[in-house]
Amino acid sequence: VKDDRVDRTPVRWIRLNLVKCADQIDDVIAELKRKFKNEVNDWRDIVPGSLYRDVYVPLLFGVHPTDKITSHELYKTGKIIIQDRASCFPAHILHPTGDDVVIDACAAPGNKTTHVASYMFAKEEPTSVKIHAFEKDPERAKTLRTMIKTAGVDQGIDVHVGDFTKLAKPDIFPNVTGFILDPSCSGSGIFGRQMIDDINTNKRDDSTTVEQQPEEITDVNLKTRLSKLSSFQFEIVKYAMSFPSAKKLVYSTCSIHPEENERIVIDLLLDAKVQEWGWKVRQRSGVMPDWPRRGLVEEFDDVFRDQKEALSLAESCIRVMPKEDGGIGFFAVCFERD
Ligand code: SAM
């Protein structure tokens, strides 16, 4: 049964940026509670003046978009960052520590890069580079640098401008342990114009905007577009999997199409090289197990005869429905190896 609160409850999600406020977490939360006096236990009950604390991503809060958070001191000082809830899943799933070295292969405008930094540099910023952020579009790379600066990271992140698959050779980065892979996609999970990227940076990834799509999306041109996008998505993830020390990789899209989601997972699992390199999908127990909406089992059923295996693979994936799940549509999965 459709919950009728969903359509009338837009949410703006804000996360604490631990690079800036790891030693003031209680103070920042107290300040949020002072500003938003009406605490609610369900994001669907958010109205102007409410504060909801998320149960899936630590230190993430939901407020009403009409509450002007961007003029607040916490926002201006970079202690809080606006980021859609689902967009926070990849860094949370990757859960990097100060010992990791992470590549964000498709980084601009930098929401996930800076979220990864929030996990890695909460205690202290390292003296060496721990995150390599690649972005092929020079204009968007400028936005990425601005966001990194606002997030308060001075030396832990290197920005590389260019195509990740050409610039990043596995032997140049032999120590990389983790990957965030959030490539350009159809953006079919994005709705409306209240986009997070817009708010933080005034810039968007044009290749992912719904508005960029032709006025009339026919079945034929959608199919062609999805086919091009999915080849690119498969190749870029496979390339990342060739890095010798990589142990965990989170793949995500803001698409609702299985071609860009479950079917990428299937093609990777069936690829001989990916198998040779030892990559597997991390089970549901290690991928936000309480998040209720999982991958589409029918996609795996088609390929894996063993019903149990198909179900387990589907359960390992995360899906987020646009609006219904409190934000943009999204997909995430984690690959790992010993
Ligand atoms: N992860 C970003 C965030 O959370 O803020 C959003 C990434 S957006 C979906 C995809 C980005 O990947 C775009 O900025 C696009 O220009 C970039 N991109 C696409 N292909 C690339 C490649 N081969 N190498 C590096 N960057 C690429």
Image (spheres, helix red, strand yellow):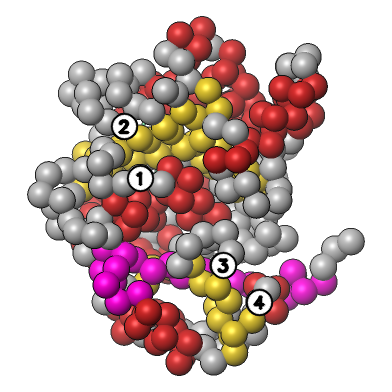
Residue 176 left/right relative to 299: left
Which numbered circle lies on residue 177? 2
Q: Measured from the top left, where is residue 56 in percent x and y?
A: 57, 59
Q: Which residues are magenta?
A: 4-25
Q: Label 4, on which residue?
A: 41
Q: Measured from the top left, where is residue 146 in percent x and y?
A: 24, 60
Label 1 or label 4, whichever comes before in sequence order: 4
| Residue for point 58% across, 64% down | 55
Disc tally is 4
Label 2 or label 4, whichever comes before in sequence order: 4
| Residue for point 19% across, 58% down | 124
Q: CA distance from mark 1 to mark 2?
A: 9 Å
Placement of the N terminus among the 4 image quadrants:
bottom right
**9 within the magenta span:** yes
| Amino acid of disc 3 | Asp
Inspect this view and state whether residue 167 appears: no
| Amino acid of disc 1 | Pro
Label 3 or label 1, whichever comes before in sequence order: 3
